[in-house]
Image (cartoon, coloured by chain):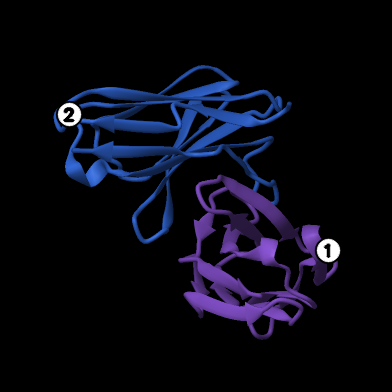
């Protein structure tokens, strides 16, 4: 069975400070993992994805995530938050043999000036 | 622009009505999806189609009927709308069915049932 747990429903950081959004998954198969971002009243945009290549994945807008199999985690990080990063972030797991996405419940990132 | 597009963006209607949401992708993808995002922002897959054939049907009420006239389109028709159908509906597409493939999402359609 596949599932995704996003440990924090809300994260608040100051502009210029690091961002950490946590994601843990369970999967019966070797999964692909994704992070998507949803800005207010907008659609979902792919930030980055892991598909069994390098465990440290770099995405757009300075975000990166590290796949840790031993911890079943795929946390999203960014060294320095920008006001435009304020949005909802979704961690997604997909079994490698079938393109069925399982979404986490989302983490709302607030960036304070 | 290459993209996944949905129409309408907003849909407000009365209970009991029948409505359709259209989705088109010009990415040349073979697989298309419909997702429902509830008020708690939780996204759940409803349907997926590959080359116009239904692949996934996640125990969605049969009031919901997807229709794929060609690979580039996957429309969602909803009969006898209920209050609980109010949500944001996202269309998505991917090239293949395998899990490594990225899904590209449309902007969403916010459905409000009164």
Seen as rendered, the residue at the extreme left is B16
Residue B56: x and y, percent? 44, 40
Q: Nearer the viewer, mark 2 or mark 1?
A: 2
Residue B1: x and y, percent? 73, 26
B6 or A85, which lies in front?
A: A85
Residue at left 41%, top 59%? B42
Query: In the rendered image, what is the letter of the chain coloured blue?
Result: B
The quarter holding residue A47 reads bottom right
Other-residue count near label 2 (Cα within 10 Å), few / some / many at <14 / 14–19 / ≥20: few
The quarter holding residue B67 reads top left
Determine the secondary structure under disc 1: loop
Q: CA distance from mark 2 to mark 1?
A: 47 Å
Residue A26: x and y, percent? 54, 73
Instruction: Tell me the residue that label 1 is attached to.
Output: A53
Residue at left 59%, top 75%? A23
B63 or A90, which lies in front?
A: A90
Is B34 above or below relative to A6?
Answer: above
Total label count?
2
Q: Are marks 2 and 1 in contact (CB under 8 Å)?
A: no
Query: In the rendered image, what is the letter of the chain coloured purple?
Result: A
Instruction: Tell me the residue that label 2 is attached to.
Output: B80
A86 or B105, which lies in front?
A: A86
Residue A10 in sight here: yes
Please tell me the numbered disc located at residue B7. Answer: none
């Amino acid at each position: 069975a596949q599932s995704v747990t996003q440990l924090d429903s809300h994260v608040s950081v100051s502009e210029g400070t690091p961002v950490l959004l946590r994601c843990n998954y369970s999967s019966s198969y070797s999964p692909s993992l994704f992070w998507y971002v949803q800005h207010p009243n907008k659609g979902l945009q792919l930030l980055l994805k892991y598909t069994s290549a390098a465990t440290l994945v770099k995405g757009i807008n300075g975000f990166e995530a590290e796949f840790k199999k031993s911890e079943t985690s795929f946390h999203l990080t960014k060294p320095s938050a920008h006001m435009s990063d304020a949005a909802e972030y979704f961690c997604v797991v997909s079994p490698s043999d079938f393109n069925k996405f399982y979404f986490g419940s989302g983490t709302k990132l607030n960036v304070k000036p | 622009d290459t993209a996944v597009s949905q129409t309408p963006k907003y849909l407000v209607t009365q209970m009991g009505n029948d409505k359709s949401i259209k989705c088109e992708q010009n990415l040349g993808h073979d697989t298309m999806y419909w997702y429902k995002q509830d008020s708690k922002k939780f996204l759940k897959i409803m349907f997926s189609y590959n080359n116009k054939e239904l692949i996934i049907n996640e125990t969605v009420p049969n009031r919901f009927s997807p229709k794929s006239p060609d690979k580039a389109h996957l429309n969602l028709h909803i009969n006898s709308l209920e209050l609980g159908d109010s949500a944001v509906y996202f269309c998505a597409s991917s090239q293949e069915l395998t899990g490594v493939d990225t899904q590209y999402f449309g902007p969403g359609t916010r459905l409000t049932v009164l």
